[in-house]
Amino acid sequence: MRYLPHSDADRASMLATIGAAEVDSLFADVPDSAHLKGPIEGLPRMQSEIEVERHMSALASRNTGTSAAVSFLGGGAYRHHVPAAVDHLIQRGEFLTSYTPYQPEISQGTLQMLFEFQTMVSMLTGMEVANASMYDGSTAAAEAMSMACRVTGRNKSIISGGVHGHYRDILATQAKWTTQEVLLAPVDAQDTEDLTALIDANTACVMVQNPSSFGHLRDLSKLAEACQAKGALLVVIVTEVVSLGLLASPGSMGADIVVAEGQSLGNPLGFGGPYVGLFATREKYMRQMPGRLCGETVDANGKRGFVLTLSTREQHIRREKATSNICTNAGLCALAFTIHLSLLGEQGLKKLALLNHAKAVQTAEKLEAAGLRVINTGFFNEFTVDLGKPAAALVDKLAEKKILAGVPASRLYPEAKEVENLLIIAATELTTDADIYQLAEVLK
Amino acid sequence: MSMNTQGRPTAPDLKVANVNDLPETVLGHKGLVFEEKLLFEQSSPGTCGVDLPLAPMVKSRLHVLKARESIGLPELAEPQVIRHYTRLSQKNYAIDTGLYPLGSCTMKHNPRLNEKMTRLAGLADLHPLQPASTTQGALQLIHELADWLMKLTGMPAVAMSPAAGAHGEYCGMLAIKAAIADKGEAKTRTKVIVPESAHGTNPATAASLGFTVVPVKAEADGRVRAEAVKAVLGPDVAAIMLTNPNTCGLFERDIIDIAMAVRAAGAYFYCDGANFNAIVGRVRPADLGVDCMHINLHKTFSTPHGGGGPGAGPVVLSERLAPYAPVPFVVKTGETLRLIEQTTEKEAAKSIGRLKGFHGQMGMFIRALTYCLSHGADGLWQASGDAVLNANYIASQLKTIMSQPYAGYCMHEALFDDTFLKDTGVTTLDFAKAMIDEGYHPMTMYFPLVVHGAFLIEPTESESKQAIDDFIKVMISLAKRARAGEADHFAAAPRFTPRARLDETRAARQPVLRWQASTLSKSGG
């Protein structure tokens, strides 16, 4: 077996040193009834790279990837171009095969990168501090809800109807099984909701998404004021992080916690994961944050260096009193995010955001010219059209022609019958004129 | 000074005690060890590492919002970015660099075939919300990995979506909570038994779901006795969370009796599968009586640790917990695969709900299935055997010079305490730092908490005999030096690293979590 370095002679010599007759005798503590006498039946035997590759390639070929189709899919995961340097760098073994930087003297590479990541996330979101990443945007939202409850000492969260359906489901699951409560506002396809009236003395947070799941853009300043007046936190979710190159940051609009899905930068679609969750907040709530934090310090010679810090919040110290049970972050995905954003820089990100918006505007204009109705007043790179007939059936049919026309709203909100005619369409820098032409042809 | 025949020196003529004693260089670089500034300090405004096509001229439709304020991102071209992250990478210890005996983390080799497979067209570029007709291969892949995990554990169901081990714990404990609620016992069963040696995530998870944690002690041999569990079992107990093999690297001998007692008391048995690598392919947790167990794909199934994630934590479930599995899950009818995404669908009527966006850590599923196929059942049998062999080989040679809290064979990790360092002035931390100078990543230290000054050494099956012999030689040498009164040697370690010991107290007391144009120190990167 190519990954196992011992020869039979090595094993025999090691057993002799131990004084054991065979490897099996080292498993003496295993009860007899549970101790298998040989490899498990009904599973294949070891295979060469050639055979494994053949099997996996066959599975891959049964899918129609977005690069082999015309794709306008978004809905919380976006097809962007990842510069070649990103994948090259994240596959360096020193990044790929290291672990949590428990020993900072031999982990400065990961630690400095995390410090840069935290800085970039703070800048993008317009917040004071950020953590070293979470599993993904959706689970970060669940952590934000718990944190809001801890900070305010209240237990009810108001969730906007413009929040991604999966995120709403996760928050509902968490509330169902804990003492937290959620008030799920009705699905807000038309961008008409006003949550201010719902905020009361028991509200821990109001959670909104910008751009919303249907692509609407919101000025959240008024909502932030309303939250502040009632002592509730404003949590802003961003599922398309490229939008932050063009839109006013959540921090500038008064957000208290910002959670975002960072997949758009550096990370492939990959059928939904692994992705990278961004989590940022105000400095005064720093010690209530979940997840890992990297901080600056000095070494014994006075030189700047980086360490994991404020770990007294975490489970390995606090056990049942921890702020969260989180024990890991999304290191490699955070690295990909950081490298992509480093390559883009200030101007590159702004240009990328502008290009995304322009492609979406072109798409919307073409569809409107074909007689379709875009329901958004404003949008970034994703908008919603009303097809006048159920979107899911049409999307399924178009998939046969390798046209992935968008996400039917019913896929994210199956309970909301009123959205079943809506199709959520995203364009990115990878969208071509030919793609737009084809989409307009099949939808008109 | 020794020289070759051309008069070129071939060996240095002085011994340097500490790289920091070397004369300073102009920029602080020391040969291949570079001082690397933060990216923000290298910005050259007006440069960019990405060229993009020109945006078409359109009328903006952003409407309502005010404009983006300045962000503050640094600006660099591609060569500068590549050099920066290449230099940073060289400041990391990694499995690819050397033996990484971090106990309970299973730092085994990460096969590169796994990486190649995740990048296949049709997998890497697959959107999670495509119609199922265009993702049949991906759903089949999840189905096949699920089948492996069920057969390796003997369990009838598996929830694939949890993002990491701790997320898997949350999933499993939720399923238990739901099962208890279904029996009308939600109000009465409020306690969860957790051994004191457990990983911190266990009590944290139980507490986050409103359970009260009841600790249970292990006996002098490092194992929990069935009698001790029975003594705290009662109608108010929801579950036990037991790690097996446990965090001391020992197989819980009473585990079947414990499982039977837990079941008889109407409670559930959550097994923490962090240490599954010791027994994978040799012992099926179902045969031990567990109700659910998470599997860290980044440990046992070789998906890369990536500097701290991403992980993946599928949870296998017993018959009595299977109905509560979270959405989404894959259902195969004939040759057609479907994704059940909503609790309103009949297959998910009792589901606890959704725990994660989309369908789980697909990239990790691809790697884990590639690992399973590469090994086969026979390769996994051999792998767990070698992992346990390596740990026992280390234990057998270090037990006389270091000190073992528990006698007898261990599983895949060898545990020592700091008794052998008594009165030497050397701590476990000092010892670990001296290991760094010898070219090793230290073992897990000070965990499990129940063992004083713990050294938890997990070599994994990936190390050759020669590599392990070298490691043993170093450990023996360091133990001898500690006992010989060379405490100063340890206190000054590490010497040969890009940084000496870092001031963690300062980091926590005056937290600086981001760079600012006027950040606290200017001593260079």
Image: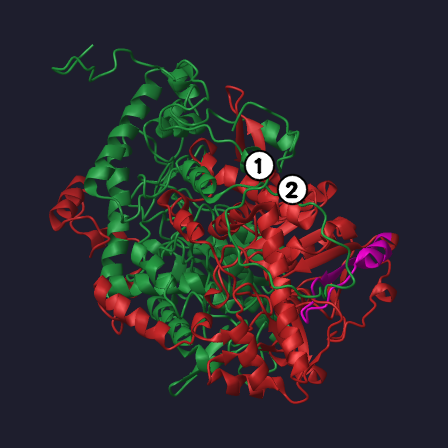
Chain colours: A red, B green
Q: How many marks?
A: 2
Name the amino acid type tagged 1: Phe
Secondary structure type for disc 2: loop
Q: Position of residue A245 (x, y in %)?
A: 64, 53
Who comes first in sequence, dot 1 or dot 2? 1
Which residue, given by chain and number where applicable, does mark 1 sit on? B40
Query: Residue at left 24%, top 51%?
Result: B386
Q: B1 or A7, which is in the foreground?
A: B1
Q: Position of residue B179 (x, y in %)?
A: 57, 72
The magenta span reads A202-228
Which quarter shows the C terminus of chain A? bottom right
Q: Is residue B508 left or right of residue B146?
A: right
User: Is the residue marked by circle 1 packed among few (<14), some (14-19), or many (20+) residues within 10 Å?
Assistant: some
Q: Is residue B352 visible?
A: yes
Q: Is residue A109 left or right of residue A258?
A: left
Residue lying at the far bottom of the rendered structure: A389
Name the amino acid type tagged 2: Gly
Q: Is residue A278 visible?
A: no
Secondary structure type for disc 1: helix
Residue B72: mark in rendering? 2
